[in-house]
Image (cartoon, helix red, strand yellow):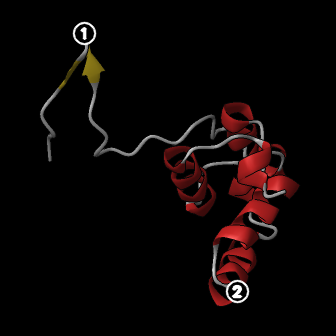
Amino acid sequence: MSIAEKFELDERQQDRVIAMAWEDRTPFEAIEYQFGLTEKEVIKFMQEQMHPRNWRKWRARVQGRKTKHAKLRDMEISRFKSAAQRQITGNRISKKKY
């Protein structure tokens, strides 16, 4: 049984897990909080979803990376927010300011 089937992830959720796993500043704990997948399950999921060469690149990239593990992060980093991220207020998204 694949990880996607085990956790009943639809295609959109699978895409989001992959995107979060590739993001440098998204820790595995955030993926676990949102989707219930532990770090080991995320690794297995990525291996199932990716071509072997791409999986090896991803694995080398995240292995030992401090930003992917909440316990290894600097205490100043509580969450990442891009300066270009739009603000949402009152169910309206403001225009992007450059």
Residue 62, quarter of the rendered image: bottom right
Task: Evaluate whether residue 75 shows in this view.
Answer: no
**If you read the primary sequence from the N terminus, does the residue marked by circle 2 or circle 1 appear first?**
2
Residue at 26%, 15% in the rendered image:
89
Spot occupied by residue 24 in the image (x, y as percentages of width and height): 59, 60
SS at badge 1: loop
Looking at this rendering, what residue extends furthest in the top direction? 90
Disc 1 crowd rating (10 Å Cα; few below 14, some 14-19, many 20+) is few
Residue 21 position in % (x across, y down): 63, 58
State the residue position of label 2. Answer: 52
Name the residue located 72 percent from the left edge and 32 percent from the top edge: 33
Classify residue 93 by image quadrant.
top left
Q: Are marks 2 and 1 in contact (CB under 8 Å)?
A: no
Name the side, left or right, on which 29 lies relative to 92: right
Lateral position of residue 96 relative to residue 58, left or right:
left
Residue 98 x/y as whole percent: 14, 47
Viewport quadrant of the N terminus: bottom right
Would you place residue 22 above or below residue 67 in this image?
A: below
- The residue pinned by badge 1 equals 90
